[in-house]
Amino acid sequence: MFTGIIEEIGKIAEYTKLSDGARLKISCKEILDDIKIGDSVSVNGCCQTVVEFTKDYFIADISEETLKVTNFGDIKSGYSVNLERALTPTTRMGGHIVQGHIDCTGKLISVEKMSGFYNMRFEIPEKNTRYVVNKGSIAVNGISLTVANMENNIFSVAVIPHTYSGTTLAKLNIGESVNIETDILGRYVEKFLSSDNNSSKLSENFLRENGFI
């Protein structure tokens, strides 16, 4: 698991398409301090396993399924990516619970520089909007953000300058694809409420009355 607090911006040194996926060679420095073979690293929000590394880069193999549900099929050498090591029991949970399992891809619709923050709007598939709520958490390319507004299938986030410049958000172009992971808590609540064996007092009305919906 991850927190959505980006540690470093890495760069795709090599992108090799394989018959059953792809291989990424990612140049970076900070996250390599204590890395080991088999460790999990969030690459633009997608959990990847380190299969090889040196002091200057690490390599990860991407499955065909991951290529289908992420924006990895669009990236190429020189592309910048957000990197975060998996959390430890002593890690501060500065963001929210991020699994590194991408739900869908979205695209950047607009960026507006406001006084003290950047208002960014993203469009996602209609079927994924059920898990996006105002003031809820969402991960965009692995970055933990708070939904400021949700209208139809477009959500907006208010991004502070530190996050904007310290991640790949500042490098995004209008229309560019991003990886989206919705809040896992919403998916568990939906599963629980839809269960035939739900005998607890937890219900949709209870959640609404207590401000969770």
Image (cartoon, rainbow, N blue to C red):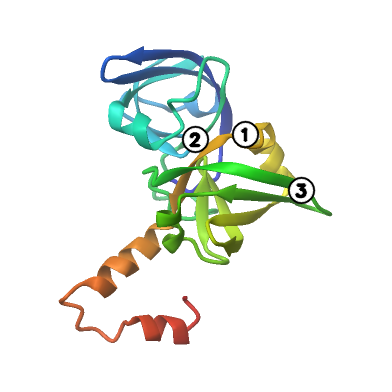
Q: Identify the element where label 3 is drawn.
A: strand
Amino acid identity at mark 2:
Asn
Q: Is residue 157 left or right of residue 138?
A: right
Amino acid identity at mark 1:
Thr
Give me the C-alpha separation between circle 2 and circle 1: 9 Å
For the point 28% across and 87% down, the residue is 201
Residue on which the image places disc 3: 112
Whether 48 is drawn above or below 89: the answer is above
Q: Position of residue 125 (x, y in %)?
A: 45, 50
Pick whichever of labels 2 and 3 is earlier in the sequence: 2
Q: Is residue 190 left or right of residue 163?
A: left
Residue on which the image places disc 2: 44
Pick whichever of labels 3 and 1 is earlier in the sequence: 3
- Residue lying at the far left in this picture: please name it: 197
Residue on which the image places disc 1: 168
Give me the C-alpha separation between circle 2 and circle 3: 22 Å
Amino acid identity at mark 3:
Glu
Q: Nearer the viewer, residue 143 or 53?
A: 143
Whether 16 is drawn above or below 96: the answer is above
User: Visible in this render: residue 107?
Assistant: yes
